[in-house]
C-alpha cells in the first residue's frame, strides 16, 4: 500500500512472534528439546558493512529468527529484527547501528556505526527431520574507527639556532593503538627523511637544541589497524648566521698573503656566509664601500684597484654581522714590448746585445737565448744572463756568422705567454759612399760618408791622406766640416767603415777639386734666330754645389727675367738662350763660370750671328690708275737669283715745294707672299700724285728697291662702246633681213611679186625657182654662204669684216695705239687719245 506516492513500511508483526517465544523477550534461550549454542567474535569498520550469521554457513536457514543487541557495557538486550521466511520485521531504533537488513537469518549491517559495538544474539527455530530445533548464536562485534587526518603544531614557526623546538602531531579520532612517524624535507625540495634520534615514533617530535639542518618541511603520519593518514607539510624555519664569510677569487691565483690578477683582466669576487635569512653582502675596498651584493665583478681591473677587499655579511633578522678580508695584488706588464738592440764594443771586436723592458709590477725577467741554446727558462735566477728589466750579453764578433739571430725572452705574471724580441747580426752589402757639399756662402765644406744598414750599425770615421783621424766616429753616417781657407783644392780624404762581423775595414775616398766645365767653343746662328749656349759641369766637383753663371760680351751677368735671354738650369748644367739674335749686336764672346768652395772655373763661348743672303732686285712692269683715280694696279717682276720671303710696296707724294724735303716712304702693302707679282692698292687721294716702289725681302734682309714710278692715267673707253653699238645694229639688221627673205620664200603664192623680185634677179647661172618651201630654204642658205666667199663688198656682213681688218695689227688703225704702263716721274697729264669708229650698214 502506498500513501502519497511512497511505499509504507510493512507493519510490525513482532508481537505474535513474541507470543510464540515468550522466553526470548528477555534474551534467554528457548528451552525446547536439545538447543545448540554458538559464540564467536566479529570485527567491523565504521562506515563499512558487516554480516552476522545465525549458525553455521552450511546449515539451512532458520524458519524463525530473532536478533537482539546488547550494547557494550550495558546488560539489557534490545530487539533488532524478527524474521520468518520472507517476512521480516525490524525493531524501531536500529538506525543507530547502521543500515540493518535481515535475509535468510543473516543480519547485515551497512554503514556501520560505533554504537553497533556490543553483543548480538540470534535465536532461531531450525527445521530438522520434521521437527523444529532451537539454536542460539552470540556474536561479539567490535567496531573499528579509521584514523583521521592528523595535523602538526610546532611550538614556534621560526626559532633561533640552539633553541628547543617541539612539533606535536594530533589526530581527532582513530581506534587505538596509534603509531606515529615523522618525515623531514629540505627547504628547496629533495627526498623526505626521518630525523634520527629525535623521538620520531611519538606524537611529539623534540628538536633540542635546534640547528640549521632542522630547517625544512615536517610531515606526521599516523597508523592503526584500519588505515594510516599523513598531515600537511609544516615548515620550520631555523634562523642562524651569518657564519664567517668565505671569499672566492676568479681567476684563482693564490699568492702568499692573498690573491693576484693581471691588469685588464676581469676579476670576480664571490662571498659566501651561510645565514638564514640570507645574508646581505657589502664589499669594501681599502675600507670604502664599492659594491652591494654577493658577487663583485671588476671588469678590466686596473693597477689602482689593487689592495684589500672586505666582504661584510649581515643577518637583518638576528642583527648579527661577520666579515672576511683578502689582499688582491694587480700585476701589470711594462708598457709596449721588450726592445732589443745591438751595439759594437771593445773597439769593434765584440757585439753587446741589450734587452730592455722597463716598468711593470713586478719587474719583467729577461734573458738572452742564442740559436743553439735551450729556450726553456731556468729557475735559478742569474743563470744564462737572466735579470730584471734589462739584460746584456757580450757576443764575440769573430765567432759570429753573418745573419745569426738572437732572442730575448721576457716573462711576467700578467702575461701567460710571455713576450720576446730578437735581433739578427748582419753586415750591409756594398761599401760606404762619400759626398761633399758646401754651406751657404761657401764658408765651409761638409764631407758626408754614409753606409746604412747592418746590426750593429757600421761605424764610420774620416781620415786625411796621411792617415790622421779627423772628427769623431759615428754610426751609419759621418759628417766632417772643413773651413774653406784656400788649402782644400786637390786634397784627398778617406772614410773608413768598421763592423764587428767584418774582419777587414771598408773605405771610400773623396778628392776636393775646382769645378770643371764643358761647352762648345763657338756657336753660329742666322739673324733673327735663337742661339743656345750650353755649359755643363763634369767630375766630382759638382757635389760641392758649384754656382754656374753666364756673362754677355760686355761682362754683364745674365740674370733670369731678361727679355733678351732665357736661362735653363739642371742639376749640373746651365744653358743660355739668346732670343731674336741681332747682327752684329749679339755677336761676341760669352763666358760660363762655375764657382764652388774650392775655386772658380771659366770657359768662353763665341757667338757668331750671320745675316741672311740678299734677295733679288725688283722692277715695276705696270702701274696704272683706275677710272676713279682712288686705286692703282701694280705689277712687277724680279731680276737675278736669290731667296726671298715676301715683298713690300712703298709710296709717297711726289709734288712738293722745292724748299721742302721729300716726304718719307710709307708702306702701302706688306707681307706679300713670295709668289705674288701684282697687287691692287686703294685708299688714294685723286688730287695727289703718288710715287711707288717695290722691295724684295729675305727674312730680315731687304733687297735694292725698284725704280720709282708714278701711275699712268686710265685708257679712253668710248671706242669700245661705239664699236659695240655698230656691231649690234648690223646683227639686228641681218637677222631681220633673213627672217623677211625666209617668209617670202615660204609664201611665194601669196606674195608673188616679192618672190619674183628676190629670186629671179639672178644671172644666167642662177638656178630654177624652188618649188617647195624646203627647197627655198636650201637655196637661201647656199647663197648666204656663197656671198662672202665671192668677196662681194656689198653683201650683208661685210661691215664687220671691214672693221676687223685694221685689228690684225695695222698700226695706223684708230684705237690700236700701245697703251702706256706707267708715266715717267714728274708728269701729271697724259696726251689725249683720238679714236675714230666707222660703221657701215647695208640697206
Image: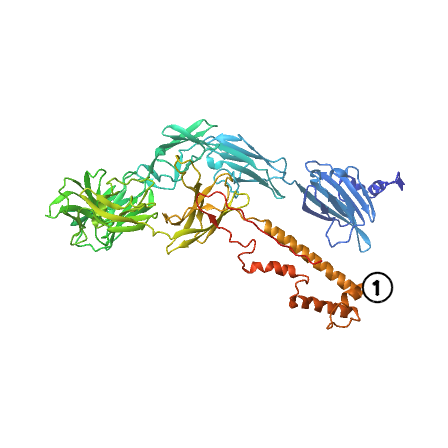
Give the colouring mode of the picture.
Answer: rainbow
Q: Residue farthest to the front?
A: 764
The residue to which callout 1 is attached is 750
Label 1: few (<14), some or many (≥20) within 10 Å?
Answer: few
Is 639 placed left or right of 239 in the picture?
A: left
Q: Quadrant of the C terminus?
A: bottom right
Q: Position of residue 203 (x, y in %)?
A: 55, 36
Q: Quadrant of residue 736?
A: bottom right
- Secondary element at image label 1: loop
Q: Residue at x 89, y 39 (%)?
A: 3
Q: Classify 829 as above or below 839.
A: above
- Depth check: 450 or 764 in front? 764
Q: Please determine whether, in this image, residue 644 is positioned above or below residue 6.
A: below
- Would residue 347 be seen by someone viewing this image from the given angle? no
Q: Quadrant of the N terminus?
A: top right
Q: Nearer the viewer, residue 422 or 825?
A: 825
Question: Could you say where residue 34 lies in the image, as x and y percent from the top left?
Answer: 76, 50
Q: Nearer the viewer, residue 69 or 236?
A: 236
Of residues 630 and 361, the one nearer the viewer is 630
Residue 2: where, in percent of width, then height? 89, 41
- Rendering coords of residue 196 (x, y %): 48, 40
Quarter of the rendering containing residue 140:
top right
Amino acid at each position: 500500500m502506498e500513501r502519497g506516492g511512497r511505499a509504507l513500511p510493512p507493519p510490525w508483526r513482532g508481537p505474535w512472534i513474541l507470543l510464540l517465544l515468550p522466553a526470548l523477550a528477555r534474551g534467554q534461550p528457548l528451552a525446547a528439546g536439545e538447543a545448540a549454542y554458538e559464540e564467536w567474535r566479529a570485527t567491523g569498520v565504521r562506515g563499512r558493512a558487516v554480516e552476522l550469521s545465525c549458525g553455521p554457513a552450511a546449515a539451512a536457514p532458520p524458519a524463525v529468527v530473532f536478533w537482539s543487541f546488547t550494547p557494550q557495557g550495558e546488560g539489557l538486550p534490545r530487539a533488532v529484527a524478527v524474521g520468518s521466511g520472507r517476512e521480516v520485521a525490524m525493531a524501531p531504533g536500529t538506525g543507530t547501528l547502521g543500515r540493518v537488513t535481515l535475509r535468510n537469518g543473516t543480519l547485515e549491517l551497512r554503514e556501520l556505526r560505533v554504537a553497533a559495538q556490543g553483543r548480538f544474539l540470534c535465536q532461531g527455530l531450525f527445521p530438522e527431520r520434521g521437527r523444529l530445533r532451537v539454536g542460539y548464536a552470540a556474536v561479539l562485534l567490535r567496531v573499528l574507527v579509521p584514523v583521521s587526518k592528523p595535523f602538526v603544531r610546532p611550538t614556534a614557526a621560526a626559532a633561533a639556532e640552539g633553541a628547543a623546538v617541539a612539533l606535536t602531531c594530533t589526530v581527532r579520532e582513530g581506534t587505538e593503538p596509534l603509531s606515529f612517524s615523522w618525515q623531514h624535507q629540505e627547504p628547496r625540495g629533495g627526498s623526505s627523511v626521518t630525523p634520527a634520534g629525535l623521538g620520531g615514533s611519538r606524537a611529539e617530535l623534540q628538536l633540542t637544541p635546534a640547528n640549521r639542518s632542522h630547517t625544512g618541511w615536517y610531515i606526521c603520519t599516523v597508523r592503526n589497524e584500519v588505515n594510516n593518514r599523513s598531515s600537511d607539510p609544516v615548515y620550520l624555519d631555523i634562523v642562524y648566521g651569518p657564519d664567517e664569510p668565505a671569499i672566492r677569487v676568479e681567476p684563482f691565483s693564490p699568492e702568499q698573503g692573498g690573491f693576484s690578477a693581471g691588469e685588464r683582466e676581469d676579476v670576480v669576487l664571490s662571498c659566501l656566509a651561510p645565514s638564514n635569512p640570507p645574508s646581505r653582502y657589502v664589499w669594501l675596498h681599502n675600507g670604502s664601500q664599492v659594491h652591494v651584493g654577493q658577487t663583485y665583478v671588476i671588469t678590466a681591473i686596473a693597477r689602482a684597484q689593487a689592495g684589500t677587499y672586505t666582504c661584510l655579511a649581515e643577518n637583518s633578522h638576528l642583527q648579527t654581522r661577520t666579515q672576511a678580508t683578502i689582499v688582491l695584488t694587480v700585476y701589470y706588464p711594462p708598457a709596449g714590448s721588450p726592445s732589443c738592440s745591438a751595439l759594437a764594443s771593445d773597439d769593434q771586436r765584440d757585439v753587446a746585445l741589450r734587452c730592455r723592458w722597463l716598468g711593470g709590477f713586478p719587474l719583467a725577467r729577461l734573458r738572452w737565448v742564442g740559436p743553439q741554446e735551450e729556450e726553456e727558462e731556468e729557475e735559478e735566477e742569474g743563470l744564462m744572463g737572466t735579470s730584471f728589466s734589462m739584460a746584456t750579453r757580450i757576443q764575440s764578433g769573430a765567432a759570429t756568422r753573418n745573419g745569426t739571430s738572437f732572442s730575448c725572452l721576457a716573462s711576467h705574471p700578467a702575461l701567460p705567454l710571455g713576450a720576446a724580441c730578437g735581433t739578427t747580426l748582419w753586415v750591409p752589402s756594398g761599401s760606404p759612399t762619400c759626398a761633399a757639399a758646401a754651406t751657404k756662402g761657401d764658408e765651409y765644406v761638409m764631407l758626408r760618408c754614409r753606409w746604412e744598414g747592418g746590426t750593429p750599425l757600421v761605424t764610420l770615421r774620416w781620415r786625411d791622406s796621411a792617415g790622421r783621424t779627423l772628427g769623431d766616429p759615428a754610426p751609419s753616417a759621418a759628417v766632417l766640416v772643413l773651413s774653406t781657407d784656400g788649402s782644400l783644392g786637390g786634397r784627398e780624404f778617406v772614410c773608413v767603415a768598421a763592423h764587428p762581423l767584418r774582419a777587414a775595414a771598408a773605405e771610400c775616398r773623396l778628392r776636393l777639386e775646382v769645378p770643371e766645365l764643358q761647352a762648345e767653343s763657338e756657336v753660329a746662328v742666322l739673324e733673327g734666330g735663337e742661339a743656345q749656349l750650353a755649359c755643363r759641369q763634369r767630375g766630382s766637383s759638382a757635389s760641392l754645389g758649384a754656382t754656374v753663371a753666364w756673362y754677355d760680351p760686355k761682362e754683364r751677368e745674365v740674370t733670369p727675367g731678361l727679355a733678351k735671354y732665357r736661362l735653363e738650369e739642371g742639376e749640373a748644367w746651365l744653358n743660355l738662350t739668346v732670343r731674336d739674335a741681332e747682327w752684329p749686336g749679339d755677336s761676341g764672346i760669352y763666358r760660363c763660370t762655375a764657382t764652388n768652395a774650392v775655386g772658380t772655373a771659366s770657359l768662353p763661348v763665341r757667338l757668331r750671328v750671320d745675316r741672311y743672303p740678299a734677295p733679288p732686285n725688283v722692277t715695276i712692269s705696270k702701274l696704272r690708275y683706275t677710272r676713279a683715280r682712288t686705286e692703282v694696279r701694280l705689277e712687277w717682276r724680279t731680276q737675278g737669283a736669290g731667296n726671298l720671303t715676301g715683298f713690300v710696296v712703298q709710296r709717297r707724294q711726289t709734288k712738293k715745294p722745292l724748299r721742302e724735303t721729300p716726304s718719307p716712304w710709307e708702306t702701302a702693302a706688306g707681307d706679300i707672299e713670295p709668289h705674288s707679282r701684282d697687287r691692287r692698292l686703294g685708299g688714294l687721294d685723286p688730287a695727289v700724285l703718288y710715287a711707288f716702289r717695290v722691295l724684295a725681302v729675305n727674312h730680315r734682309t731687304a733687297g735694292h728697291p725698284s725704280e720709282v714710278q708714278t701711275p699712268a692715267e686710265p685708257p679712253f673707253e668710248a671706242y669700245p662702246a661705239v664699236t659695240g653699238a655698230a656691231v649690234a645694229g648690223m646683227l639686228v639688221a641681218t637677222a631681220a633681213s633673213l627672217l623677211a627673205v625666209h617668209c617670202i620664200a615660204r609664201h611665194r603664192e601669196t606674195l608673188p611679186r616679192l618672190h619674183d623680185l628676190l629670186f629671179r634677179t639672178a644671172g644666167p647661172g642662177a638656178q630654177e625657182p624652188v618649188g617647195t618651201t624646203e627647197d627655198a630654204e636650201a637655196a637661201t642658205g647656199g647663197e648666204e654662204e656663197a656671198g662672202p666667199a665671192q668677196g662681194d663688198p656689198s653683201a650683208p656682213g661685210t661691215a664687220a669684216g671691214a672693221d676687223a681688218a685694221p685689228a690684225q695689227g695695222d698700226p695706223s688703225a684708230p684705237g690700236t695705239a700701245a697703251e702706256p704702263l706707267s708715266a715717267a716721274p714728274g708728269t701729271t697729264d697724259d696726251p689725249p687719245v683720238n679714236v675714230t669708229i666707222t660703221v657701215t650698214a647695208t640697206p
